[in-house]
Amino acid sequence: MNQNASVLIIEDDRELSRLLQLDLQRHNFNVAVTNNGLDGLRMFQNDRHDLVVLDVALPMMDGLTVCERIREISNAPILMMTAHAVSEHDIAEGLNRGADEYM
């Protein structure tokens, strides 16, 4: 991926999203951040980012729904994140709804 690529972080943990943003910017990525699913979907629709880092549990629209909606309009890679333990079923659901990987 081009180091000037655009990354959209959709994460409600402001400290975590800020750390991710700083690290990606340090590597010359353009980074946009939002803390809820609905705004994240709107931001993606407006700017079509090259990569999406997406939390599973989000306010206003859950991450799985956001993932599914983004996948309907784009093939951009979607990296799902969760701080909670996930089962194989949860991972399969995310992948089936359009995620490319879990972290």
Image: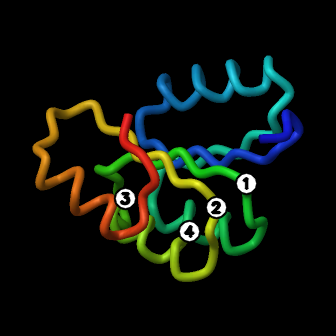
- Circle nearer the N terminus (3, 4): 4
What residue is rendered at 44% in x and 67% in y?
A: 66
* CB contact under 8 Å: marks 3 and 4: no
The amino acid type found where label 4 is placed reads Leu
**On the rendered image, what quadrant is the N terminus found in?**
top right
Circle 3 is placed at which residue position?
63
The tag on residue 41 is 4
Helix, strand or loop at label 4? It is: helix
Q: Where 77 sits versus 47, above or below?
A: above
Is disc 4 surrounded by few (<14), some (14 to 19) or many (20+) residues within 10 Å?
A: many
The amino acid type found where label 2 is placed reads Ala
- Circle nearer the N terminus (4, 2): 4
- Circle nearer the N terminus (1, 4): 4
- Circle nearer the N terminus (2, 1): 1
Mark 4 or mark 2, which is nearer to you?
Answer: 2
> Where in the figure is residue 44, as x and y percent of width and height?
66, 66
What residue is rendered at 54% in x and 71% in y?
A: 70
Q: Where 74 sits versus 87, above or below?
A: below
> Where in the figure is residue 52, as x and y percent of width and height?
59, 51
* CB contact under 8 Å: marks 3 and 1: no
Is disc 3 surrounded by few (<14), some (14 to 19) or many (20+) residues within 10 Å?
A: many
Circle 2 is placed at which residue position?
76
The amino acid type found where label 1 is placed reads Asp
Is 65 positioned to the left or the right of 47 in the image? Answer: left
